[in-house]
Image: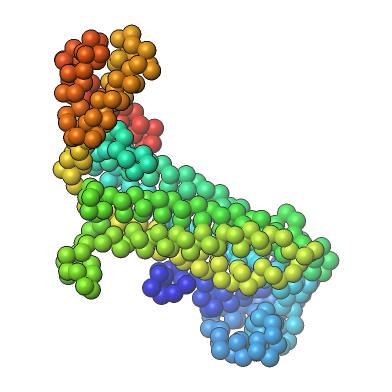
Amino acid sequence: MIPRYSRPEMAAIWAPETKFRIWFEIEAHAGDAMAALGLIPAENAAAVWRARDVPFDIARIDAIERETKHDVIAFLTHLAEIVGPENARFVHQGMTSSDVLDTCFNIQLVRAADILLADLDALLAALRRRAFEHKLTPCIGRSHGIHAEPTTFGLKLAVAHAEMARNRARMAAARAEVATGAISGAVGTFAHVDPRVEAHVCAAMGLSPEPVSTQVIPRDRHAMFFATLAVIASSVERIATEIRHLQRTEVGEAEEYFAPGQKGSSAMPHKRNPVLSENLTGLARLVRGCALPAMENVALWHERDISHSSVERAIGPDATVTLDFALVRLTGVIERLVVYPAAMAANLDRLHGLIHSQRVLLALTQKGLAREAAYAAVQRNAMRSWETGADFRALLAADPEVAACLSPAEIEALFDLGWHLRHVDSIFARVFGEG
């Protein structure tokens, strides 16, 4: 997590001030619940809330931790300095450090998920707008990087929209799965803390109680969360890679917006590079790199160890901050993407009609020619066109075997671009729910 790729709202979730404030709220809410159950004096529980408006001294907590070698104890020691030892002695009653750490971590992930869901909503809106703008803008579809058959640029964007809609559903599910808390004490048996305390804290903090914890919340939940971030990042990269290919000089069908005063190269003044999309490709790799450690965190020793702790201190902020930045950047790229329909039209004609070869093949079979013979007839003319640049239609019309089956008018009709686009409305209705 570096400032260059961080947005303030997401970065703030992982700031020490935010973490310690969440720790405080967990402890204070637990005190309220214990007081309501008659386990600690109500006046002492109420007194702890005096720290609500007192800023925590991060340097002081760090100094205490350097001595205690324990972050939660350092925080509790500093909290006692604020609320007084007579009140602090009732804080953290029956609780263990993981109750605070795990519940806080999940709160942070939930808050991060809310930002990511908003990011996805903005991206979906941009994709939808541009998809309808170019719904019927014809362009060549490619397989293996080679011209295949016509499609539309709107359909390319509709594919991206559908993919990101699935990702939004995945993100919402991952948020729900990780939105649990645990105040169950050492090894999770509630031996020294009433389960009703957990229920109260979770309700106050917007979580559900973990049905069964050990001394930690099960890490399969977190593995799924980070795996979801990785999938979303992969979709970001897929879209970015498509833009990079379309911006290649030899293609030139779309490009990132190039602002006045922007420079593409320190050496070559003419350059206009897809730097944002390339950046998104790299950021996606970083997010995906967090998924495997999260999965390896699932296997802990017995009821608890801390092999997961150092990992999560890094991947929690890194993955969420990086993906947040990437989604916002991709939204900006889509919103300002410059599209060149004329270049798309030129590329459609680049192979002299070869992109209609399947229609000719099917027409010949409909006329009674065996598929193998029809394929051979179309391919030999296609290869001549490919190698010589001759017009495919003219070659077909001059081929005796083809001419015996298809009239010149029938051959001409097979090269109608509109044939390939006649179901675009139906596809858009599937994706967007309207024509």
Q: Residue at x 67, y 63 (%)?
A: 297
Q: Is residue 60 visible?
A: yes
In the picture, measured across the screen, residue 167 lies left or right of residue 265, that is right
The front one of 299 and 357 is 357
- Quadrant of the rendered image containing residue 45: bottom right
Q: Position of residue 409 (x, y in %)?
A: 16, 15
In the picture, measured across the screen, residue 349 lies left or right of residue 8, that is left
Q: Residue at x 38, y 36 (%)?
A: 431
Q: Is residue 385 above or below residue 260?
A: above
Q: Is residue 324 above or below residue 426?
A: below
Q: Is residue 115 visible?
A: no
Q: Residue at x 40, y 50 (%)?
A: 238
In the picture, measured across the screen, residue 110 lies left or right of residue 265, that is right
- Quadrant of the rendered image containing residue 78: bottom right
Q: Is residue 289 above or below residue 154?
A: below
Q: Position of residue 387 (x, y in %)?
A: 23, 35
Q: Position of residue 102 (x, y in %)?
A: 66, 67
Q: Is residue 147 above or below residue 123?
A: above
The front one of 122 and 338 is 338
Q: Position of residue 247 (x, y in %)?
A: 26, 53
Q: How is the structure coloured here? A: rainbow
Instruction: Name the residue furthest right.
Output: 191
Image quarter (top left, top right, bottom left or bottom right) of the C terminus: top left
The front one of 10 and 131 is 131
What is the count of numbered marks?
A: 0
